[in-house]
Image (cartoon, rainbow, N blue to C red):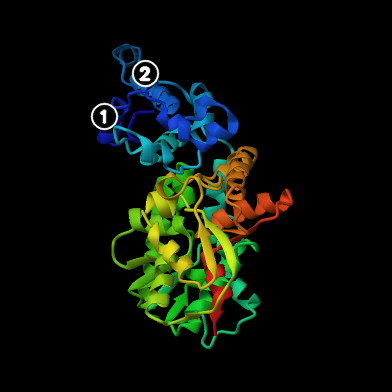
Amino acid sequence: MANRDYSVRQLLELGACTGCQLCAEVCPAVTASGRGELSGVYRIKGLREVVKKRGSLAGKILGRRGPTGGELKPFSETVFRCTLCGNCEEICPVGIRLKNLWISLRQDMVHSEAYPGKIEMIRDNLQGSRNVFAEDNEERAEWTEDMRYRPRKELIKDKAQITYFTGCVAAYFPMAQKIPMALAEIMDTGGIDFTLLGEEEWCCGFPLLGAGLKETAREFIGHNMEAVRRKGSRRIVFACPTCYQMWREYYPREFQLTHATQFLFELIRGKFIALKTLPLKVTYHDPCDLGRGARVFEDPRKVIRAIPGVRLVELARNRENTRCCGGGGNLEMIDPKLSTEISKRKIQEVLETGAQAVVTSCQQCVRTMTTYVKRNKVPLEVMDITQLVLRALRR
């Protein structure tokens, strides 16, 4: 396999790594597992060797194309045990764009036929059902039937000013369905003209990128773009940071893209909604894709501080230094034990603040942290910021 999965810049960046190991120090997978080979510096070293062997003169003379899939398998095992949280890129002193490099590396491993078996499951689920859970895509908006609040208008309209892109986790996972229920109720209460896509919504495509299947994601991008065009919307709201980042980075720039935290602050500032006093001590967990990825740090904090009675205490690691919850990069599917160990350290950090609840702005973070809290009977409430605002909403 040639080195065609990498841009010229990425191949040049391999030589820029100084081996300082700062990326290893902040890597959640390394911290949770104690395995240095899961670090960015190890992967770059390994990738350098792969690229070198593929391009060697001796190899070309002998007709070799570089390491085989079987030879790459041990290296590949480390490649997919990463949450793609981006903390390595944040701290890299020479500015290597590591997250994009890891996505290209995963694509390389797929093309080289050196990848975990779960990758085929991810591909089959998405190609077959258009969502990561292999559920019936016609049921993507069934959560609306479980809402206790009855919206004044239908939530799936032919035309609307705003489209709310729900995301796979919130659409299908019962624990996370409270998030779209909350945001839909808030938007309806505020008189916002919005619609869901329902079964016309497909996965945003990021699980495919994380699985090394970037080419397959193009079909999903094209379909979702056309689905929003048919609604006549000029703006899309996302509660899922990963969907938001995927649209920002990989979709054509045709619509105004807004994360729910930004939209909620607009509603509060514009007095579209009113909030009552809610006596609660909370801490806020910055989701990796929303914080380090999209640089949205202040809007969620402004929303929390706008709720009377709520006291916000910061985590030891916050904003661009946030500690990953363990739920990203398809790690739950590849290595659920490692994902749980990462989540454990996140919850320990939360408990050190003395907060009654941890608030975040990501359906996957809610799912990952809630799962750990419930399984281990930790006295802590986990909620999305939409749920917090709904609790304080004055109707």
Q: Is the residue marked by circle 2 packed among few (<14), some (14-19), or many (20+) residues within 10 Å?
A: some
Among the 4 quarters of the image, the one containing residue 14: top left
* Residue 386 x/y as whole percent: 52, 68
* Residue 333 x/y as whole percent: 60, 44
Is residue 249 depicted above or below 157 in this figure? Answer: above
Q: Closest to the observer: 136 or 307?
A: 307
Mark 2 secondary-structure assignment: helix
- Amino acid bearing label 1: Leu
Q: Residue at x 56, y 73 (%)?
A: 182
Q: Closest to the observer: 318 or 137?
A: 318
* Residue 188 x/y as whole percent: 49, 82
Among the 4 quarters of the image, the one containing residue 283: bottom right
Q: Residue at x 53, y 24 (%)?
A: 74
- Amino acid bearing label 2: Lys
Q: Which residue is mark 1?
A: 12
Q: Earlier in the sequence, mark 2 or mark 1?
A: 1
Q: Which residue is mark 2?
A: 53
Q: Closest to the observer: 238 or 315?
A: 315
